[in-house]
Image (spheres, rainbow, N blue to C red):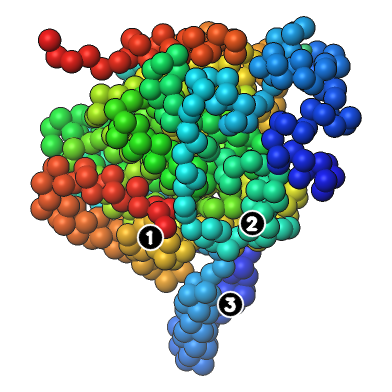
Amino acid sequence: MISFLEFEKPIAALEARIAELRTTASDSDLDIAGEISRLEKKSAGMLAATYAKLTPWQKTQVARHPQRPHFVDYLRMGFTDFIPLGGDRLYGEDAAIIGGFARLNGRRVMVMGHEKGHDTATRIKHNFGMAKPEGYRKAIRLMEMAGKFGLPVVTLVDTAGAFPGVEAEERGQAEAIARSIEACLAVPVPIVSAIVGEGGSGGAVALAAADRVLMLEHSIYSVISPEGASSILWRTPDKAPDAAEAMKVTAQDLLSLNVIERVVPEPAGGAHRDAPAAAQALFGAIEQELDALSALPAGDLLARREERFLAIGRA
Amino acid sequence: MSWLSKVRNSLGGLTKRDTPDNLWTKCPGCGEMLFTREFEDNLSVCPRCQFHGRIGAQARFDQLLDAGYAVLPAARVPENPLNFRDSKKYSDRLKIARAANPFPDALTNALGTVEGRKVVLGVQDFAFMGGSMGMAVGEAFVEAVERAIAEDCGYVICTAAGGARMQEGILSLMQMPKATVAIRRLARAGLPYIVVLTDPTTGGVTASYAMLGDVQIAEPGALIGFAGQRVIQDTIREKLPDGFQRAEYLHAHGMVDMVVHRKDLKGTLASLLEYLERKEVA
Ligand SMILES: [Zn+2]
């Protein structure tokens, strides 16, 4: 059962009407069957039309949808033979970032990403996808190992941001993020990142200083949450929709700003309505990028990666 | 601040101290009224409680570099790339900040010497839009490092920032990896990178170039952290520890090498630069 977002209310009403008709209709009632099929067509049309012109704030809601596929879903749908690797060897294991060896259509890779969790228990276990220093330091460790053994790195980004807490600060949250960015830039193998939900600030770029950065069609990537920008710049929490608009947080915006290389289309009505189709499109795109990158010599790869970031903001 | 005093301040410290409204400075540390001239002559450190006041690029250059340094040209970057506006247009905010400050953005670099040792020194000025890191700061950082490599010397940066410049959206976030690329290039050239964390250094600046120094120095009492204290308080809903995110707290937790009083900063940098000087292979 899909839970509808606020802006999907007309579609929800239509779907409710269809469900109602289904329960009242007997199999032989051809009039009602015809009505159902008419309404289904209308509903699908409304869904497609709505999703074709989502506002940045609506996309923010879709990107955060509780039923949106998360890292563990993509792992299950896109990879085989996953061997999880745990711990930063310094302090602890942080389940907000999951990583390990896996095969992507047979290709050996190091995969890692933020996991938000899907119910109360798993959300608490994964700390809502908000990593602490040990999470980033685990990511660094895995990237270094990937470099050592020649495994391409695939990262899936989905976080509201790095965890803001006393113990995270105490253990060097800022340093861990800075080193994680550095590790991305240094890894001597192809690294492809995909923003699959929320790309929240430093906690996101820590895993996304990559050769190629992809975004799912309705994901967002931002320097600060629209709510945060609203309260700081507009001095009210109510201007988040304006902040989302002004900051240009959508995949389409970032493509036009040359900050990402590619927007991966989502199924009609968003990834949460057809997770397998979303995964298929995502992994097809990641594989294409890995193919293109693996043709480059390692020296070129690192030099191009550096130029990619140096060029941002140059007149 | 009136329009007139803004313009007066933009002229730098020369006229400022002669105007009656700037004759006295209240120490934010102990509340003592200090004679502004004496406060500034004491490196903007309170003689009573040792509170380290925030200072701009010019004062910092004068304090740390030997006479005869050259301020490097400002970085040229696209202006207001997102055509951003909140309650004000970003381009208007920039105009206001430029009218009130001596340099055109938050990071200014100079080439000079510290007790005779050549260095590029960068100073981030909190007075310019909270020191925030946008494309101009990122590009200034990269150009400073390129100059240091060309001059075969190290880069020292005094950081101060509330974080990234939100008005540049994702482009400000991208300055984190961009500056990190420059740091890697400096390292490959075998040249030192020294960070002096000054009050306050937070957000994306801390989570990138401010934490990647070969040597990390902090000024006494400086607020240094990733997340803002209000955000943390909203998350944990309890009182923050004493001295949380202050320089001394970071030192106790192993995040900086040393906390150095401003009067000792120049000498410390000179000694460090001597140790980090690249030696010819024997
Ligand atoms: Zn005082």
> Secondary structure beneath disc 1?
loop
Q: Chain of mark 2?
A: B
Residue at the farthest front position: B68
Please tell me whether mark 3 sits on a helix, a strand or a loop.
helix
Is the residue marked by circle 3 packed among few (<14), some (14-19), or many (20+) residues within 10 Å? some
Distance in Å between CA atoms under marks 1 and 3: 39 Å
The residue pinned by badge 1 equals A258
Q: Chain of mark 1?
A: A
| Residue A79 vertical placement versus B200 (above, below) | below
Q: Report helix, strand or loop for mark 2.
A: helix
The residue wearing badge 2 is: B90
Q: Are labels 1 and 3 assigned to the same chain? A: yes
Q: Residue at x 46, y 69 (%)?
A: A269
Camera-nearest residue between B146 and A183: B146
* Image coordinates for residue A291, horizontal then vertical, percent: 15, 55
> Which residue is labeled 3 in the image?
A14
Q: Nearer the viewer, mark 1 or mark 3?
A: 1
Q: Residues within 10 Å of mark 2 (few under 14, many from 20)?
A: many
- Could you tell whether B216 is left or right of B124 in the image? left
Q: Which chain contains the residue that carries disc 3?
A: A
Question: In the image, which is nearer the foreground, mark 2 or mark 3?
Answer: 2
